[in-house]
Image (cartoon, rainbow, N blue to C red):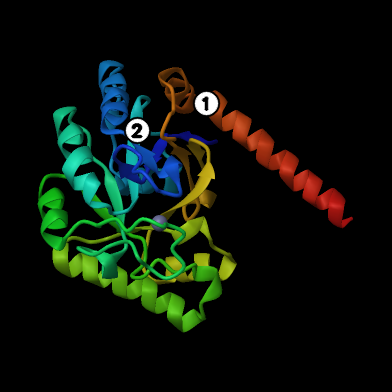
Amino acid sequence: MKIKLPILFYHKIHEPRPGARSINLYVPPASFEQQLRYLHKRGYKSISLKQAIEKIRQSKPIAPKSVAITFDDGYLDNYEYAYPILKKYNFTATIFMVTDFAGRDNSWPHSKETLPERLMSWDNIREMAQHGMSFGSHTCNHWNLNKLSVDEISRELVRSKRKLENELQQEVISFCYPYGEYNSQVLGLVEHSGYLGACATEHGNRHTPDDIYTLKRVFIWHDTPMWKFGYYLSSFYDYEHTRKQKRKALKKRAATD
Ligand SMILES: [Zn+2]
């Protein structure tokens, strides 16, 4: 049985900046507020990723009208714009931090971004953690893990986890793959490094214990209209993507047969 839980997936809560390459990574603060107001009015409550992972691992259902909110990379605008709106509507979120870049620009190796943007400082991170927000690891350096050696992958996984745990004095149990890239070796090392679950970039909102290291999410685009936001929360969204993925797999198999 699949367990329904939309895990919303954001990067930057800001108006798209002129000259930015990936406009889809921006959700304007007014749209973000409209989305949280929508959830709040309809009785949605946030569940922490930690609780969600525990439930999914045990195949236990999650209360209907639950939602998990995630942000990748840890941009300063998450603190400046998203955090006050989250507090206003009583939602919590998990932010996947690139730990070596806290307080710095997002100029990590192989970044496709042309515009440098600032990440949160450890002071910002600690303040949010003290007020109910959670943090997960997005590695130390935002490498594509598929391209690293076993030792390098392990270092990225273990060192980022330890850094977050030392700064926050809390256990860090969730992980998220830079560029959404992983292979079976990476999955094994994430588990081995002590993470209990991980978010991927595949789309969907229903989960099984087998997906615990590749949790599907709901990508919110910079111009997602509200009718579509509502659709993203429904099971139909998951049916559509499961069907698409099956079709893709069949095509791939047919091509290699
Ligand atoms: Zn990222």
Disc 1: residue Cβ within 8 A of ligand 1's nearest atom:
no
Residue at the spot 29% in from the left edge and 37% down from the top edge: 47
- The answer to whether mark 1 and mark 2 are in CB contact below 8 A is no
Q: Position of residue 26 (x, y in %)?
A: 37, 41
Element type where label 1 sits in the image: helix
Disc 2: residue Cβ within 8 A of ligand 1's nearest atom:
no
Q: Residues within 10 Å of mark 2 (few under 14, many from 20)?
A: many
Q: Quadrant of residue 87?
A: top left
Residue at the spot 46% in from the left edge and 67% down from the top edge: 110
Q: Residues within 10 Å of mark 1 (few under 14, many from 20)?
A: some
Which amino acid, by three-letter code, is at mark 2?
A: Val
Rendered view: 133 above or below 8 = below
The residue at which mark 1 appears reads as: 235
Element type where label 2 sits in the image: strand
Q: Earlier in the sequence, mark 1 or mark 2?
A: 2
Distance CA(mark 1)–CA(mark 2):
13 Å
Q: Position of residue 111 (x, y in %)?
A: 43, 63
Left or right, 100 with respect to 242, comes to left
Front position in the image: 12 or 23: 23
The residue at which mark 2 appears reads as: 67
Which amino acid, by three-letter code, is at mark 1?
A: Ser
Q: Is residue 69 visible?
A: yes
Query: In the displayed image of the protein, which residue is found farthest to the front?
Result: 19
Left or right, 84 with respect to 240, comes to left
Front position in the image: 201 or 209: 201
User: Which image quarter is the N terminus in?
Assistant: top right
Residue at the spot 27% in from the left edge and 66% down from the top edge: 101
Q: Position of residue 140 (x, y in %)?
A: 33, 70
State the mark number for residue 52.
none
